[in-house]
């Protein structure tokens, strides 16, 4: 129970030295008693408002100083400050004690809480299949000493075509159904991640080893296996004495790590890409049937993995690298196709949709 304040009529304070000393002592006793007897936050707050509030009893005594002489203010000012400090200190100590008791009580109530209990109908977040594959690829290339990089998705004609040995009149441009930006001369949405090669050559000195994962765009009709936006992965190595043997060894090591199959084999076929010479198409033994033949590989035992080749001297020149001193190889493959193969996704459009039924599987 809080002590009653009716015994003190603070609205009728008689400002005399004797009465003020008595009131200070009385208020301190009542305040400390009220704080000591408070056992809940509500009771303690009530005591604070009564004695330490803006219109509390200590504030009323402070107002009494206004009518005192200078000598009286010097005498009673420090006494009132001491009163307020003593009461505030008692309040803070009591508040800390009550808070501690409440925390202990809450901990005791939750002592038997089962953190593994299942709560039905709860939505959980998952990592998108693109993100899972990209993290896996980046871990592989980082472990092999490659740098992970990227370039802008809005590119110039120079970086997307000319610097990659595809001049304005080159027939290879017809192989890229390009999105050209309206009202912007020579600007386009990049059609491949190879644009990052030139930018890296212009800013780095050999030896260079980099990997690029990113979105590319082609003006294609959308169906289950084609889309105007998809993902590509590209890697490049430039140094002195790079040969086709380095390309084949590096490609096999990368694909074995990517599919997590140490016995995975590759085969190569001649292929044409303007930015490499010679160019090859890379096939791998089907990782789903280990080359025995299945529906995924159409009973052939092989799956096309991507394109590769030794970097064309003209591309090295565009990047400011002397092809008489340095050579390099490049490998690229469709990241979207890899995701669809790995997870058995039948429709490319599912990867860009927002179907929770599809996404929660990953």
Image (spheres, rainbow, N blue to C red):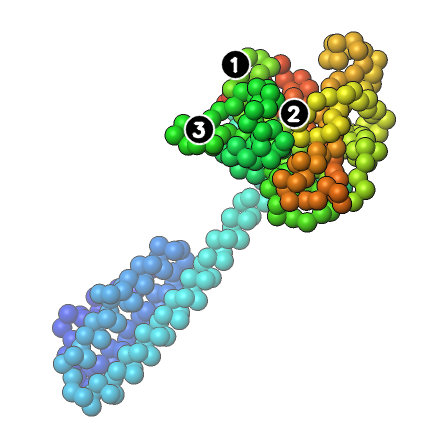
**Whole-Å distance between the Cαs marked 1 and 2?**
17 Å
- Quick check: 23 above or below 44? below
Q: Earlier in the sequence, mark 3 or mark 1?
A: 3
Left or right of 272: which side holds 122? left
Q: Earlier in the sequence, mark 1 or mark 2?
A: 1
The numbered disc on residue 29 is: none
Q: Where, quadrant-wise, is the C terminus in this rendering? A: top right
Q: Position of residue 74 (x, y in %)?
A: 24, 87
Q: Residues within 10 Å of mark 3 (few under 14, many from 20)?
A: few
Residue lying at 60% horizontally and 14% vertically, measured from the top left = 225
**Whole-Å distance between the Cαs marked 3 and 1?**
18 Å
> What residue is disc 1 on?
221
Q: Position of residue 130 (x, y in %)?
A: 61, 29
Which callout, 2 or 3, points to the residue nearer the camera?
A: 3
Q: Residues within 10 Å of mark 1 (few under 14, many from 20)?
A: few
Residue lying at 61% horizontally and 48% vertically, measured from the top left = 203
> What residue is disc 3 on?
181
Is mark 3 in CB contact (under 8 Å) with mark 1? no
Residue 253 seen in render: no
Residue occupying the far bottom of the picture: 71
Left or right of 361: which side holds 263? right
> What residue is disc 2 on?
334
Residue lying at 52% horizontally and 32% vertically, measured from the top left = 157
Q: Secondary structure at mark 1?
A: loop
Is mark 2 in CB contact (under 8 Å) with mark 3? no
Q: Position of residue 189 (x, y in %)?
A: 50, 29
Residue lying at 29% horizontally and 83% vertically, measured from the top left = 78
Q: Secondary structure at mark 3?
A: loop
Q: Position of residue 106 (x, y in %)?
A: 51, 48
Residue 251 found in image quarter: top right
């Amino acid at each position: 129970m809080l002590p009653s304040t009716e015994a003190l009529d603070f609205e009728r304070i008689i400002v005399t030295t004797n009465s003020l000393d008595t009131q200070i002592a009385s208020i301190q006793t009542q305040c400390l008693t009220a704080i000591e007897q408070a056992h809940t936050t509500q009771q303690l707050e009530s005591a604070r408002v009564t004695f330490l509030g803006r219109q509390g009893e200590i504030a009323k005594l402070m107002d009494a100083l206004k009518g005192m002489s200078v000598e009286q203010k010097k005498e009673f000012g420090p006494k009132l400050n001491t009163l307020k400090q003593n009461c505030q200190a008692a309040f803070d100590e009591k508040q800390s004690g009550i808070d501690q008791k409440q925390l202990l009580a809450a901990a005791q109530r939750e002592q038997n809480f089962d953190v593994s209990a299942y709560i039905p109908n709860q939505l959980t977040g998952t990592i998108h299949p693109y993100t899972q594959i990209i993290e896996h690829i980046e871990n592989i290339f980082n472990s092999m000493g490659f740098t992970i990089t990227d370039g802008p998705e809005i590119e110039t004609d120079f970086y997307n075509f000319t610097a990659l040995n595809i001049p304005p009149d080159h027939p290879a441009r017809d192989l890229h159904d390009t999105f050209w930006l309206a009202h912007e001369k020579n600007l386009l949405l990049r059609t491949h991640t190879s644009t990052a090669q030139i930018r890296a050559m212009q800013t780095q000195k050999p030896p260079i080893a980099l990997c690029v994962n990113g979105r590319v765009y082609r003006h294609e009709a959308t169906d289950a296996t084609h889309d105007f936006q998809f993902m590509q992965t590209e890697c490049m190595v430039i140094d002195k004495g790079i040969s086709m043997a380095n390309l084949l060894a590096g490609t096999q090591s990368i694909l074995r790590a990517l599919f997590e199959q140490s016995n995975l084999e590759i085969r190569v076929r001649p292929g044409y890409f303007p930015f490499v010479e010679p160019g090859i198409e890379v096939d791998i033994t089907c990782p789903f049937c280990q080359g025995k033949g299945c529906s995924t590989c159409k009973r052939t035992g092989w799956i096309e993995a991507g394109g590769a080749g030794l970097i064309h001297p003209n591309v090295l020149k565009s990047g400011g690298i002397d092809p008489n001193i340095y050579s390099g190889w490049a490998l690229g493959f469709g990241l979207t196709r890899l995701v669809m193969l790995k997870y058995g996704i039948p429709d490319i459009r599912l990867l860009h949709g927002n179907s929770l039924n599809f996404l929660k599987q990953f």
